[in-house]
Image (spheres, rainbow, N blue to C red):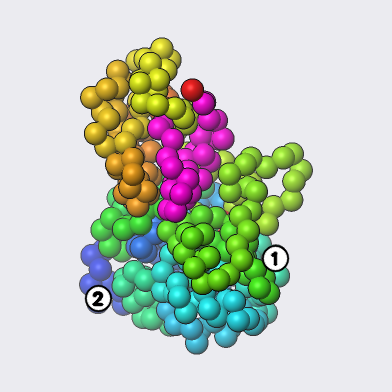
Amino acid sequence: MEYTTNILPPTKEALRLAAGALRRGELVGMPTETVYGLAANAYDPSAVEKIFLAKGRPQDNPLIVHIADLASLDGIASGIGKTAELLASRFWPGPFTMILPKSEKIPDCVTAGLDSVAVRMPSHPVAAALIRESGLPLAAPSANLSGRPSTTEARHVYDDLHGKIPYIIDGGSCDIGVESTVVKVMDNKVLLLRPGAVTVENMRELGIEIEIARAVETPLKEGETVLSPGMKYKHYAPKAKVVIVDGPIERFASYVRFHSDGHTYALVFEGEEASIPVPTLSFGHSDNSLEQASHLFTALRAADEKGASCVYCRCPSKQGVGLAVYNRLLRAAGFEVVVL
Ligand code: TXA
Ligand code: MG
């Protein structure tokens, strides 16, 4: 079905319209504090199918269910232990997703047949208001075409999905800019599947033991089983080839000069632009991972808008939120890192 896609301001009336569409089984692009989400009624399998179709998303990649209050967990997860309770009380609402045992009420297409379900309570007021107004838990992946950089502005959602969905609610630029932290909660331990703005350090402060899944920093081996199906796919990639070039700025500049083909761009830290011999995009100061996170996907999309053939990227720090920035850039680069 072909839609006229309307971008709506986040007014009460727009929320009513969008919530009505969700209840009828339609999709809505919604802002969250991390990235824009493509939302559908999590209890309606045919609405959820539309998400996979609109994004071109592989069927075996499960979705996150978004809620606005803890009481809603009842019909979604079949139980929540002490560790999950502690994490929820500290990090919800916020950029934090927990993989919990699934309730039977959640259709299999949401979880790709797994016996677990990913749940998040977003802190963005528009997302929370839309969930409340619809009265539904909302299944929502990032609102981009599968494989492309996630969307952090309403116009990015429009670029990727116009004609495929009736409404996008414009909540401005997303504060955080990279997707939520995803953890699998076990009895007394937590496995980090995807780094985000809630960091390993933040969770350790609660006295919880954290293990980092190998796939966060390493490509999967042929045939290796994955705990988070999303980790298998090349992700976040613009059309341009992306390469991380790790080394001091002088060597980075020489490397880029030597490898430039006239359509080459460099993704550098704020303030480094003048020392680079090709056109640059910047993504925040070198010591500010939060700033880098909030600019990363916009910069990767800008590379395509400028017709870049290749983008050589400075290597972000892996500390704190930096691990999330590094993880996304690594996937955009198909794990291609040059160390100088
Ligand atoms: O910040 C976010 O999390 C955004 C906003 C819209 O909330 N959503 C988002 O969704 O990033 P998506 O679908 O792009 O990423 C969800 C990730 C995927 O890597 C998926 O494989 C994983 O979570 N996931 C979902 N359910 C899972 C489950 N039951 N077990 C393991 N991994 C799961
Ligand atoms: Mg995604």
Compared to residue 83, the image places residue 303 above or below, namely above
Circle 1 — which element? loop
Q: Nearer the viewer, mark 1 or mark 2?
A: 1
Q: Is 252 situated left or right of 219 in this image?
A: left
Q: Earlier along the polypeptide chain: callout 1 or callout 2?
A: 2
Which amino acid does the dot numbered 2 rest on?
Glu
Circle 2 — which element? helix
Residue range highlighted in magenta: 313-339
Which amino acid does the dot numbered 1 rest on?
Leu
- Toward which corner of the image does residue 60 lie, by quadrant? bottom right
Q: Is 274 situated left or right of 79 in this image?
A: left
Q: Is residue 2 at all visible to an observer of this figure?
A: no
Cα distance between the residues tagged 1 and 2:
37 Å
Compared to residue 144, the image places residue 222 above or below, namely above
Whether the residue carrying mark 1 lies under 8 Å from ligand 1 is answered with yes
Question: How busy is the neighbourhood of tag 1: few (under 14 within 10 Å), some, or many (20 plus)?
Answer: some
x%, y% of residue 277?
Answer: 30, 18
x%, y% of residue 68?
Answer: 42, 79
Q: Residue at x 49, y 22 (%)?
A: 340
The residue where tag 2 is placed is: 13
- Toward which corner of the image does residue 308 lie, by quadrant? top left
Q: Which mark is residue 114?
A: 1
